[in-house]
Image: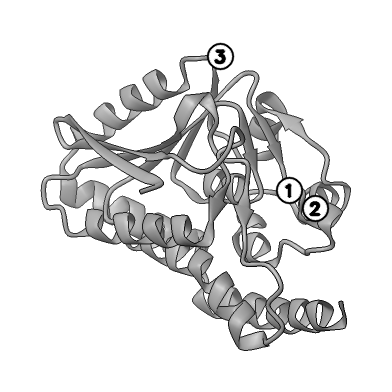
Amino acid sequence: MAIEISAQGKGVSVVTLAGQEANNFLYTPDILDLAAVLTKCASDRELRALVITGRNNMFCGGRVGVKGLTRASEVAEDLNAILKVNAALNALSVPVIAAVEGKAFGFGFGMTAQVDYAVAAENAVFSLPEMSHGLPPLIVFTYLFRFVPYKRAFELAVTSRQILAKEAQDTGIVTEVAPAGTALKRALEVANQMAAFDPKSMGLLRRFGRESAEVYSRHMSEHAVALMSVMLAERNAAH
């Protein structure tokens, strides 16, 4: 299984993205596994805070979808794996903290943006490389503007350029920057601080905060999938 979870005590658990190859890519089955793990976490009454990190100091090099799909319905099913993760993440009643080392590209970039608190190593690298492959990052755009001004987000998407943790922090994607190799340690410190609060108060704070900021939009997410599905199916059919 590409997704591992381990209890750290005092109501804190760590989800590790243990993906494929050196860049820790997540394929569609891996993303579905992540959605399942997050959904299971929602029913854990002992859970007070959740940390998401990547194996071997590599957060996530991005998502690898199923290749060669020529029907819009098939493409939509593949993309819907991302929506399942986003919905499961949003449904949690506990704060979610990202601990980012190495690359946070594509799907990894999006995960970092939409968690509640993100700790990044100073040498962590962030990018939305989709447009360099001819794929508009529409799903990320459904929530990225809650954190990043439109013109900056648009620039990051069209250039696919890589930014370091400090710029990601200044942009609004990252909460704080830690020395290289210490992101998980710092994220666990934050998680333990949050886990010590009254769980009902913390759950209400998270839910109301995310609703007020409109972090998650099921309607816009489904609209993004519909648009991308038609485009990708037509492109694949033409080839």
Residue at the (18%, 45%) spot, across then down? 47
**Residue 89, picture quadrant:** bottom left
In the image: residue 226, left or right of residue 117: right
- Looking at the image, residue 142 lies above or below residue 151: below
Tag 2: amino acid = Ala
Q: Which residue is drawn at 78% across and 63% down?
A: 135
- Amino acid, disc 3: Ala
Identify the residue under disc 1: 128
- Please say if 49 is above or below 74: above
Residue at 78% of width from left, 64% of height from top? Answer: 136
Q: Determine whether, in the image, residue 207 is placed left or right of residue 104.
A: left
- Image coordinates for residue 217, horizontal then vertical, percent: 52, 71
Question: Residue 19: where, in percent of width, then height?
Answer: 49, 43
Secondary structure under badge 3?
A: loop
Check disc 1: other Cα within 10 Å, few if <14, some if 14-19, many if 20+.
many
Which numbered tag is attached to residue 157?
A: 2
In the depicted view, which residue is nearer to us: 191 or 65?
65
In the displayed structure, 20 sits above or below 22; it is below
Quarter placement of the C terminus: bottom right
- Rendering quarter of residue 103: top right
Q: Which residue is the site of mark 3? A: 180
Relative side of 6 to 51, left or right: left
Measure the C-alpha gap from mark 3 to mark 1.
Answer: 22 Å
In three-dimensional space, the C-alpha distance between marks 2 and 1, rounded to whole angstroms, equals 6 Å
Q: Mark 2 and 1 residues: CB-CB less than 8 Å, in contact?
A: yes
Which type of secondary structure does the marked residue at label 2 adopt? helix
Q: How many labels does the image show?
A: 3
